[in-house]
């Protein structure tokens, strides 16, 4: 499994697909077709992290290949692993060349409170580590640890402190109407955690569908008032396995993501490094509508990683795709 870049530093087994539901890593496809598929991400939004002391934003450089939902990775032969590694390397190469060609076109910072303008400053392709966010490092030290694209608020001042957002091209901004994304009101459960749970009647429905008992749930984000509500649901452990699921609630009802599982060690679910039982926090940082589909851009945070990806509701099911999975290196 070392040849596959996983979506987090835990052992989640979510299956990812491209934005149109097709797999990049399909072993049945032609390698060149897979490379062409990667080139379709020319306007793919990028994760950006603000620098606390300056008006600059940093986009970590890295390519997150999607997984083939039909591939039996557990029984891969050495030759199949080699094929997959070669294909992923080709895809990454094409993605990096795309960034080099289009990096100055990413000028719109898209957040829940609206769009802001930024301009390209510099890039660091030749040093540092891929899929890495070096927080607290400055100048040459950051260059040694992090491959990045660097942008600056056109206002020339730091308006956001430390923050995260997605960065899009002018073309993407014009063709994808932003939707209103709201934070969550704070209440507390019996453990003192800040949480807004899934409504009881929806919990009953979810338990009927999944055949599993809901342990707890939390509302992460609301989109367009109450048009969409995004929840993470944790289920009761079954033996040495813990289970979780991303769920959207719309006016049509529940929309379920893939059931995810992880090992239980000492009574705690091992979703991510240095976390005690809970699923890594996910929130919708931006949502947009291109006239055909609504895309929900999410950020997942845990002690050692920050991921960015998207959810789409297709045929009432939630499809997830991780685009950026990054190790956090704090100075």
Image (cartoon, helix red, strand yellow):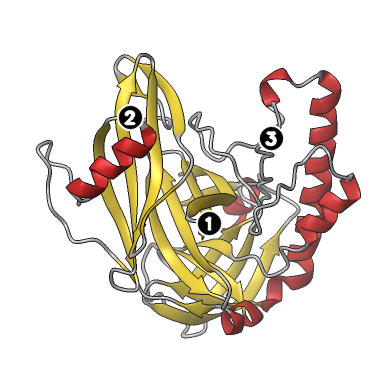
Relative side of 52 to 168, left or right: left
Q: In the depicted view, which residue is nearer to us: 251 or 319?
A: 251
Q: Secondary structure at mark 1?
A: loop
Residue at the spot x=56%, y=46% of the render? Answer: 325
| Residue that carries the numbered disc 3 in the rendered image | 70
Residue at the spot x=18%, y=46% of the render? Answer: 200
* Image location (x, y in percent) of residue 176: 56, 78
Relative side of 78 to 270, left or right: right
* Gap in angstroms between the C-alphas marked 3 and 2: 24 Å
* Image location (x, y in percent) of residue 10: 48, 31
Q: In the depicted view, which residue is nearer to us: 14 or 293?
A: 293
Would you place residue 39 above or below residue 81 in this image?
below
Q: Secondary structure at mark 3?
A: loop
* Marker disc for residue 27: none
* First of labels 1, 2 by sequence position: 2
* Mark 1 surroundings within 10 Å by alpha-carbon count, few (fewer than 14), some (14 through 19), many (20 or more): few
Relative side of 148 to 138, left or right: right
* Gap in angstroms between the C-alphas marked 1 and 2: 23 Å
* Marker disc for residue 212: 2
* First of labels 3, 1 by sequence position: 3
| Quarter occupied by the C terminus | top left
């Amino acid at each position: 499994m070392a040849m596959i870049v996983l979506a987090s530093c835990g052992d989640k087994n979510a299956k990812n697909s491209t934005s149109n539901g097709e797999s990049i890593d399909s072993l049945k496809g032609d390698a060149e077709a897979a490379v062409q598929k990667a080139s379709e991400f020319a306007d793919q939004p990028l994760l950006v992290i603000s620098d606390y002391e300056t008006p600059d934003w940093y986009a970590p450089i890295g390519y997150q290949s999607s997984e083939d939902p039909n591939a039996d990775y557990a029984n891969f032969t050495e030759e199949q692993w080699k094929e997959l590694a070669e294909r992923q390397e080709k895809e990454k190469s094409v993605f990096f060349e795309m960034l080099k060609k289009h990096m100055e076109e990413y000028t719109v910072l898209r957040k829940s409170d609206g769009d802001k303008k930024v301009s390209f400053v510099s890039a660091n392709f030749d040093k540092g580590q891929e899929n890495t966010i070096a927080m607290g490092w400055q100048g040459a030290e950051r260059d040694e640890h992090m491959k990045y694209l660097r942008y600056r608020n056109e206002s020339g001042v730091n308006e956001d402190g430390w923050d995260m957002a997605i960065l899009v091209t002018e073309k993407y901004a014009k063709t994808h109407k932003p939707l209103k994304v709201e934070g969550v009101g704070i209440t507390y459960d019996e453990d003192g955690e800040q949480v807004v749970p899934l409504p009881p009647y929806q919990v009953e429905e979810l338990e009927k569908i999944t055949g599993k008992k809901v342990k707890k749930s939390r509302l992460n984000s609301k989109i367009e008032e109450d048009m969409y509500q995004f929840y993470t649901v944790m289920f009761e452990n079954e033996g040495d396995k813990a289970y979780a699921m991303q769920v959207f609630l719309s006016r049509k009802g529940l929309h379920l993501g893939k059931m995810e599982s992880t090992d239980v060690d000492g009574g705690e679910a091992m979703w991510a490094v240095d976390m005690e039982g809970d699923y890594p926090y996910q929130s919708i940082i931006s949502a947009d509508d291109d006239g055909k589909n609504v895309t929900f851009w999410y950020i997942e945070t845990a002690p050692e990683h920050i991921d960015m990806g998207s959810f789409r509701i297709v045929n009432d099911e939630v499809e997830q795709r991780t685009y950026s999975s990054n190790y956090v290196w704090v100075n």
